[in-house]
C-alpha cells in the first residue's frame, strides 16, 4: 500500500475513533458532571464515569473504530484494559495537576483530562490492541 493510501486509511480510523469517543465521552462526561454536582469528589466522580464506560468503549472501538474481523480474545481484552489503565493514569495526572493549581471540581479540568485520556488511548490501542493490518494486494484477492 502506498504512503498516501496508508495515511488516508489511518485518518479514517482516527475519524471513527473521534466519533465513537465523542458518543462514549458524552455519556461518561455527563455522569462525571452529575456526580460532581451531587457532591462526589473529583477522583470518585472521574473513576465512576470511566469504569462504567470501559466495556462500552472496548466494544464500540473494536467493532466501529478498528473494525476487527477476528474473534475477540482474552489477550486482546487484557491489552485493551492495560491501554485503558495507562490512558486513565494520564487522565488522573491532569486532574491532579488541575487540583494542585487550585481548580477543584472543575468541568474544564475534567474536559482536559478526558482529551488527554483519548489521545493516549488512541495511540496505545492502535499500536498494541488493534494493530493496522496490511492491505491485501490485488494478487492476494
Image (cartoon, helix red, strand yellow):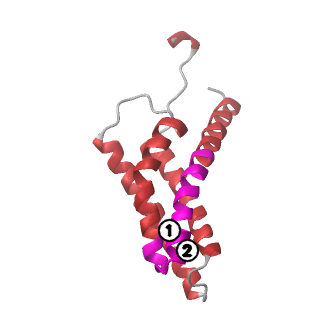
Distance from the alpha carbon under mark 2 to that under mark 1? 7 Å
Q: Circle 1 is placed at which residue position?
A: 90
Q: What residue is rendered at 48% in x and 36% in y?
A: 63
Q: Main secondary structure of the magenta part?
A: helix
Quadrant in the picture for residue 89: bottom left
Query: Residue 139: image x %, image y %?
Result: 54, 10
Query: Residue 64: image x %, image y %?
Result: 53, 37
Lateral position of residue 47 relative to residue 2, left or right: left
Quadrant of the rendering where the N terminus is positioned:
top right
Is residue 62 found inside the magenta-colored segment of the image? no
Q: What residue is rendered at 65% in x and 73% in y?
A: 108
Query: Residue 94: image x %, image y %?
Result: 55, 74
Q: What residue is rendered at 66% in x and 40% in y?
A: 11
User: Helix or strand or loop: what does disc 2 sit on?
Assistant: helix
Query: Where are the magenta residues, as a range?
Result: 19-45
Disc 1 crowd, CA 10 A, few/some/many (<14, 14-19, 20+): many
Is residue 41 found inside the magenta-colored segment of the image? yes
The numbered dot on residue 94 is 2
**Which of the two residues, 81 or 10, is positioned nearer the viewer here?**
81
Q: In the image, is residue 101 above or below residue 45?
A: below
Q: Tell me whether circle 2 and circle 1 mark residues in contact (CB < 8 Å).
A: yes
**Which of the two residues, 131 or 37, is positioned nearer the viewer here?**
37
Query: Residue 81: image x %, image y %?
Result: 37, 54
User: Helix or strand or loop: what does disc 1 sit on?
Assistant: helix
Q: What residue is rendered at 62% in x and 69% in y?
A: 112
Amino acid at each position: 500500500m502506498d504512503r498516501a493510501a496508508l495515511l488516508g486509511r489511518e485518518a479514517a480510523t482516527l475519524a471513527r475513533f473521534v466519533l465513537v469517543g465523542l458518543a462514549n465521552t458524552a455519556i461518561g462526561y455527563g455522569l462525571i458532571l452529575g456526580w460532581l454536582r451531587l457532591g462526589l469528589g473529583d477522583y470518585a466522580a472521574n473513576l465512576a464515569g470511566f469504569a462504567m464506560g470501559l466495556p462500552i468503549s472496548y466494544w464500540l472501538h473494536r467493532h466501529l473504530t478498528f473494525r476487527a474481523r477476528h474473534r475477540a480474545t482474552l489477550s486482546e481484552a487484557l491489552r485493551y484494559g492495560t491501554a485503558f489503565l495507562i490512558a486513565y493514569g494520564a487522565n488522573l495526572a491532569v486532574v491532579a495537576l488541575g487540583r494542585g493549581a487550585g481548580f477543584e471540581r472543575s468541568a474544564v479540568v475534567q474536559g482536559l483530562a478526558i482529551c488527554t485520556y483519548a489521545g493516549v488511548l488512541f495511540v496505545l490501542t492502535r499500536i498494541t490492541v488493534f494493530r493496522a493490518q496490511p492491505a491485501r494486494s490485488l494478487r492476494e484477492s
